């Protein structure tokens, strides 16, 4: 990196800095950071039959009296009502299980692609990314036709004689797992692949050559070395899935309520903006820890890059 | 290790089957005469005909495409600026915050982004009177906010791989910094800009949740139409739409692949 | 023999009245706490082929980049043709550079690459075309004009890079390891071509290299650098024959070093007592104080076989041949002398013989003249 040059080109450097850093910063500050402040503000307001449907946080009572009302009832409600608590727990559980399933399916796939002959790799990788370019909504929709009680999967199972009565899969957590793994698999495979190709896998073959059994070589060498990819992929799946709406809405049922779906309902059906805001704040608080973890990891990996 | 590859290959095959069978079924049943997904009654293209008569859906698709195009263009500009900042300006004050703001939209659940932006727009309308109502503009702003982060990732990777001495050589030959950027840097990162643009376009075209929050009456995007139709139950029209999308995407990928190969070979 | 005036025009640094074209005045460059270039001053004259020689990390590239305006010094000034350019950005300097990686723009043809700098000067299209043609011809690459950099061989790329950096007719051309990426054969041919080109165009060249042979072949003068500092600036002959410090002596070619101290001075000669054999008698250009610790440095080819060894002979040593390296034109003999030191001697293989002049384990006597080495004080 050349040092900031003096005089006239220092001016150019300063302008470039201002444009490159300032404009995106301003945009993100205005449209990404500021909104959270407003969400926080409305989460302590009270719902009202008005437009917009919440009370103001502060009010000027005449003679210089400013009344600020902070209403914590939304948060208390969430803490007390089983509905919200179980939705919250279910969201975490679903996200955790889905992350694990993505890892179990995604790791061997990423490994197989990373060790495939060079000319195959790009095609195999392309095939992983390709479904991502088609509509997410439509891909989730495809599973309705497959999973419902008179759907293709049940037809197939009954026809093959494995079961007699159709399985109830749609509108359960299982359907959500399938839908999530299906939609989020590329987000697990891509960072894993990037990580594994950076490792020298021939080292591993050398280890096997030296009498280290493949499984052991894998556990001792590859797995620890690919930890960064595992964490990155897991976070890319876990964090958004906790707040997922479309999949639980289309594939889940009343017994598999998730927080994102609940927020949507509070907002659109019940028109309770403050409660929806409170849920958003809670969800955000829940995700801060994994998010910071991911950010740290990312910075560390950049630091170690040659 | 080579001998033990078959378990790995089995998983790989299963994985690809898992990814592609649902899509293939969608395509297959888009040509089914019956309304029921499970029963094959014969080949028909009537769902395509119906699809193209569905004015509501076509209007929504046109709106979505326009939003996606504007979004992608803005996101490429902003994302490229952000990538420049991260790669070219080393450590500046507030860099950590900058990176945080740029990474968060990649994983932030849609419901949070959607809700928070809607509340912002409402608050802005109350205080400064803009945006007046919600629709094209608000959806585009919301989409740019999260898709610029994706563009930044793509462009950043390319930019940090670039040989700095190319830019230095241009400067040495008398080109001022802005000219260097336009004549040397931009053409060299053009492939990343293109894939960033396509990525942002797709992300926008795909978004249901955020758009639902920040859309106003009269601005229904394609995913919203699909969503309401899907909630009604299975509809072969959606299958037909899916088939068209898959065909377009596949065609685009094939063309991109061929032109890339040709570009390398020439 | 050249007259003094002729010599002065060939060697302007000898002329106290000559005005340097490039003057580097006490330049220092710090990266954090590290001094990449440490208080360097240099004067380079019009038409010189000047080399900065040193191992990697010695600061030579940083110095070159400061001349180009790609780095800015922490302190000190740079003057080109009398003008202080220290704060002038790269794009406004009357200087061009050929990069080590060549840095050819991959999305432009050879022609467009060469034209790039001319376009920045808002030269007319016709003039640009003429200049590009001239450059293509000069470097004999006219048939490559439509090609792209990835369709060129290493040697062709080097020519294009050179053409591009010469296209603007700079008065000063900077070359960063100009031959570094070429294979050995090509490198030798290109060395001569580069020198011819420089003489024909009359441009001042400043190159950076880690290859001493390259520097010796091409340069009018060489600056040997180490750890950000200049150790010695001189003509290739002087650098080789009369190094002023051990570091320079050892960096260029191989050399025998004998450590000791001055025990007597006689006229322009000093007597140095070392651990090897009898005290050595050497010519010294500077007066020396008795007892000064010094190093006697003698190149292997300055050693010769001694026919009449005498116990009180001057600069004579007895020893036993321990190693022989046959290089074709010459052979290198390593001879174990007196108290275990190894002395290297090179002999030209005058006669084509199956046997060497000397053989292993042979007892030999060697000698050298007081004028064929130097006494180093540091």
Image (cartoon, coloured by chain):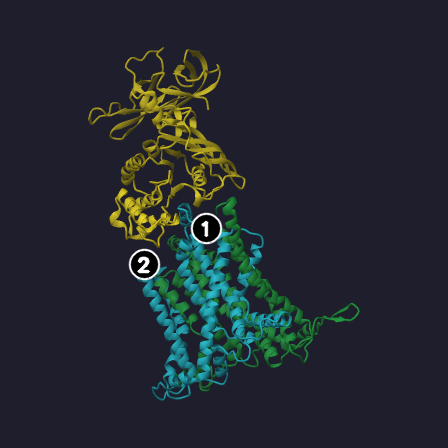
**Tags 1 and 2 in contact by the CB under 8 Å rule?**
no
Q: Secondary structure at mark 2?
A: helix
Secondary structure beneath label 1: helix
Q: Is residue A230 visible?
A: no
Of tags 1 and 2, which is closer to the observer?
1
Letter of the chain in cyan = B
| Mark 1 burial class by Cα count in 10 Å: few <14, some 14-19, many 20+ | some
Which residue: 36% across, 10% down?
Answer: C312
**Image quadrant containing the N terminus of chain B:** bottom left
Q: Name the residue tied to disc 1.
A: B177
Q: Earlier in the sequence, mark 1 or mark 2?
A: 1
Instruction: Identify the chain of the residue marked 1, using the numbered disc in the image.
Output: B
Residue C40 seen anywhere in this rendered image of the structure = yes
Residue appearing at x 45%, y 74% in the figure: B65
Q: Which percent across, then down, holds residue B216?
A: 55, 77
Marker disc for residue B264 = 2
Colour chain C appears in: yellow
Distance from label 1 to label 2 (Cα)? Answer: 29 Å
Which image quarter: residue C194?
top left
Nearest to the observer: residue C22 or residue A154: C22
Residue B62: image location, x then y, percent: 44, 77
Query: In the rendered image of this protein, does residue C77 appear above or below residue A233?
Result: above
List x then y, in percent, for residue A101.
Answer: 48, 69
Q: Position of residue C242 (x, y in %)?
A: 38, 23
Quarter of the figure with residue B154: bottom left
Identify by letter the chain in green: A
Above or below, C151 against C65 in this view is below
Given residues A223 and C185, the one toward you in this image is C185
Q: Are marks 1 and 2 on the same chain?
A: yes
């Amino acid at each position: 990196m050349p040092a900031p040059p003096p005089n006239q080109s220092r001016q150019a450097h300063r302008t470039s800095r201002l444009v490159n850093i300032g404009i995106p910063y301003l945009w993100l500050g205005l449209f990404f950071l500021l909104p959270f402040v407003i969400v926080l503000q409305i989460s302590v307001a009270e719902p009202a039959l008005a437009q917009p449907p919440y009370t103001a946080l502060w009010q000027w009572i005449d003679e210089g009296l400013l009344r600020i009302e902070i209403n914590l009832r939304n948060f208390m409600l969430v803490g007390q009502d089983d509905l919200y608590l179980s939705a919250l727990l279910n969201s975490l559980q679903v996200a955790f299980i889905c992350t694990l399933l993505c890892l179990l399916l995604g790791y061997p796939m990423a490994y197989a692609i990373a060790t495939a002959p060079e000319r195959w790799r790009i095609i195999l990788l392309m095939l992983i990314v390709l479904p991502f370019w088609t509509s997410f909504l439509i891909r989730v929709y495809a599973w309705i036709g497959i999973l419902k009680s008179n759907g293709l999967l049940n037809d197939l199972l009954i026809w093959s004689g494995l079961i007699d009565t159709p399985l109830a899969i749609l509108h359960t957590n299982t359907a959500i797992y399938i839908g999530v793994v299906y939609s989020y698999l590329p987000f697990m495979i891509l960072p894993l692949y990037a990580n594994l190709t950076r490792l020298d896998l021939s080292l591993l073959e050398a280890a096997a050559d030296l009498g280290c059994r493949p499984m052991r070589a894998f556990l001792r060498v590859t797995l620890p070395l690919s930890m960064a990819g595992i964490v990155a992929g897991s976070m890319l799946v876990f964090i958004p899935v906790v707040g997922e709406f479309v999949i639980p809405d289309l594939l889940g049922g009343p017994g598999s309520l998730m927080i994102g779906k609940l927020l949507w309902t509070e907002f659109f059906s019940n028109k309770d903006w403050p409660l929806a805001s409170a849920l958003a704040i809670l969800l955000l608080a829940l995700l801060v820890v994994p998010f910071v973890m991911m950010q740290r990891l990312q910075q560390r990996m950049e630091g170690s890059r040659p | 290790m080579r001998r033990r590859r078959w378990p790995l290959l089995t998983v790989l095959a299963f994985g690809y089957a898992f990814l592609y069978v649902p899509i293939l079924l969608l395509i297959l049943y888009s040509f089914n005469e019956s309304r029921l997904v499970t029963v094959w009654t014969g080949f028909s293209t009537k769902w395509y005909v119906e699809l193209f008569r569905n004015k509501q859906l076509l209007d929504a698709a046109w709106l979505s495409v326009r939003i996606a195009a504007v979004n992608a263009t803005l996101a490429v500009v902003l994302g490229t600026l952000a990538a420049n900042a991260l790669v070219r300006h080393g450590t500046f004050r507030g860099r950590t915050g900058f990176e945080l703001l740029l990474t968060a939209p990649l994983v932030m659940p849609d419901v949070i982004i959607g809700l928070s932006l809607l509340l912002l727009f409402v608050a802005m309308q109350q205080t400064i009177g803009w945006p007046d109502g919600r629709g094209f503009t608000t959806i585009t702003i919301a989409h740019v906010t999260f898709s610029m982060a994706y563009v930044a990732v793509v462009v950043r990777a390319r930019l940090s791989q670039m040989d700095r001495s190319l830019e230095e050589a241009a400067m040495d030959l008398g080109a001022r910094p802005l000219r260097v950027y336009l004549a040397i840097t931009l053409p060299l990162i053009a492939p990343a800009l293109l894939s960033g643009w396509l990525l942002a376009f797709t992300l926008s075209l795909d978004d249901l949740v955020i758009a639902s929050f920040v859309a106003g009456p009269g601005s229904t995007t394609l995913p919203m139409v699909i969503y309401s139709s899907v909630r009604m139950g299975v509809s072969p029209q959606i299958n037909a739409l899916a088939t068209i999308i898959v065909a377009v995407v596949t065609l685009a990928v094939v063309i991109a692949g061929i032109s890339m190969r040709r570009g390398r070979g020439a | 023999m050249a007259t003094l005036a002729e010599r002065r025009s060939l060697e302007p640094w000898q002329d106290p009245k000559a005005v340097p074209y490039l003057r580097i005045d006490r330049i220092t460059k710090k990266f954090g706490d590290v001094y990449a270039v440490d208080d360097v001053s240099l004067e380079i004259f019009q038409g010189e082929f000047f080399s900065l020689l040193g191992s990697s990390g010695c600061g030579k590239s940083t110095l070159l980049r400061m001349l180009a305006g790609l780095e800015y010094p922490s302190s000190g000034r740079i003057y080109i043709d009398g003008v202080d350019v220290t704060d002038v950005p790269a794009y406004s300097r009357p200087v061009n550079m050929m990069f080590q990686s060549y840095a050819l723009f991959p999305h432009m043809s050879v022609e467009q690459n060469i034209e790039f700098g001319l376009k920045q000067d808002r030269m007319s299209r016709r003039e640009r075309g003429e200049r590009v043609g001239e450059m293509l011809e000069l470097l004999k690459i006219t048939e490559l004009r439509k090609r792209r950099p990835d369709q060129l061989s290493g040697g062709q790329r080097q020519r294009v890079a050179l053409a591009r950096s010469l296209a603007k007719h700079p008065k000063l051309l900077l070359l960063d390891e100009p031959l570094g990426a070429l294979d050995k054969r090509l490198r030798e041919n290109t060395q001569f071509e580069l020198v011819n080109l420089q003489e024909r165009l009359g441009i001042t060249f400043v190159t950076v290299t880690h290859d001493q042979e390259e520097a010796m072949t091409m340069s009018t003068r060489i600056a040997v650098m180490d750890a950000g500092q200049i150790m010695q600036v001189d003509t290739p002959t002087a650098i080789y024959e009369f190094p002023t410090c051990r570091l320079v002596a050892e960096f260029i070619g191989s050399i025998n070093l004998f450590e000791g101290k001055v025990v007597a001075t006689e006229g322009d000669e000093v007597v140095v007592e070392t651990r090897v054999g009898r005290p050595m008698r050497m010519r010294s250009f500077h007066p020396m104080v008795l007892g000064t610790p010094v190093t006697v440095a003698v190149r292997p080819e300055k050693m010769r076989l001694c026919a009449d060894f005498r116990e009180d002979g001057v600069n004579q040593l007895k020893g036993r041949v321990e190693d022989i390296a046959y290089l074709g034109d010459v052979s290198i003999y390593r001879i174990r002398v007196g108290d275990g030191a190894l002395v290297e001697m090179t002999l030209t293989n005058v006669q084509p013989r199956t046997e060497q002049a000397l053989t292993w384990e042979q007892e030999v006597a060697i000698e050298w003249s007081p004028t064929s080495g130097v006494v180093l004080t540091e």
